[in-house]
Amino acid sequence: MNLATPLTAHAGIELPIIGGAMYPCSNPELVAAVSEAGGIGIIQPISLTYVHGHRFREGIQLIRRLTTKPIGMNALIEASSRAYHERMVSWVDIALQEGVRFFVTSLGNPRWVVDRVSPYGGIVYHDVTGRKWALKGRDGGVHGLIAVNRRAGGHSGDLGAEALLAELADLGLPVVAAGGVGDGPEFVAALRLGYAGVQIGTRLIATPECSASEAYKQAIVAAREADIVHTERLSGVPVAVIRTPYVERIGTTIGPLARRLFRGRRTKKWIRAWYALRSLRALKRTSIGRDSADPAAAVWQAGMSVATIGAIEPVATLFQRFRAHAEAA
């Protein structure tokens, strides 16, 4: 199977694999390991700064010392406030100054990112869960789409990989599969469907390079597909997590008052911001912080690819196996 795809050409990489930007799990060592192994690691700015304590420029420079291969940046572009937007613009500018040329956008109109990075030869891929958002990305000038399907961890989509690709295939952009890829066979299956590559997240948490707690990693290894549930209690919209005693205790649906606030034209921005702040703190505390070893207090994001994850393995070992499956196909 030919591993040269529009994604490898756009990103300047050997393997058509994006290491998904994960809050709070995208530590510099993991980002660098993905790129060094032949894919492209994506910096998650809030993880880099708020969770792992690096100034943004110095964090990029640390990753650069760990690998000379291409790295990317995740730009969360929903303008929840002017201050947040200005900070994101600053981070994009710093990334460009430090040589980053591949960007993944989500949660908004990507046009300003495209316009910002294009003079530098920058490439933008946009996260989508359906055709409506893909059309906005295409109209915003992006170079590719990342199709988040129902098997993804975190904020997943509603459609399976095949159905989602069918919705997007005629838009004239390369499409990357996000969700359900935990080993070589799923990687090959995605390429055979017509995807230009895959984005993986859950599989990368169960690696030595990831700074997530050992309990979190072992929970991923032990989990079955049926152990993944979707809860609204974290961010107000369904998030795929491992069923833990804590998740069972708090439940999976928000109350009627919160639901009304999310639907209100004047209140939805406020309630989104409140839930976002609460979830940032909870995920940091339970993934790498003081409660990260205690399932009774843990919220551990993961997707259905847990079904194919059987051990904690180095990123290079994983990618060698992905390559071997593709070359044998």
Image (cartoon, rainbow, N blue to C red):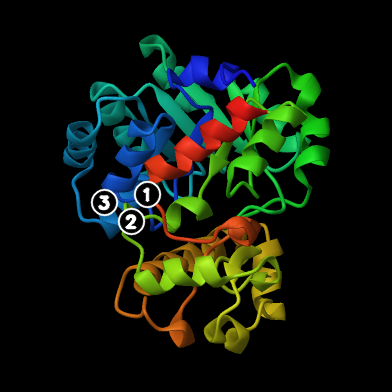
Give how far apart the Cα atoms at labels 1 and 3 are.
24 Å
Seen in the image, is 169 located left or right of residue 73?
A: right
Q: CA distance from mark 1 to mark 2?
A: 6 Å
Residue 324: x percent and y percent? 54, 32
Nearest-to-viewer mark from 3 and 2? 2
> Which residue is more in the foreground, 136 or 31?
31
From what the image shows, is residue 206 above or below residue 98?
A: below
Name which residue lies at 68% across and 65% down: 225
Does residue 319 appear left or right of residue 137 in this picture? Answer: left
**Which residue is label 3 attached to?**
49
- In the image, which disc is placed on residue 243? none
Identify which residue, 221 or 91, lies in the foreground: 221
Q: Are marks 1 and 2 in contact (CB under 8 Å)?
A: yes
Q: Position of residue 307 (x, y in %)?
A: 64, 61
Please tell me which residue is depicted at 66% across the width and 64% down the height of the picture: 238
Q: Amino acid at mark 2?
A: Pro
Residue shown at 31%/25% (left/top)? 69
Residue 275 in the image, given as x and y percentages of width and height? 51, 67
* Secondary structure beneath label 3: helix
Task: Check disc 1 and report the residue beneath it.
Answer: 314
Residue 297: quarter of image: bottom left
Q: Mark 1: few, some, or many residues within 10 Å (few <14, many ≥20)?
A: some
Residue at disc 1, secondary structure: loop
Q: Residues within 10 Å of mark 2 (few under 14, many from 20)?
A: some
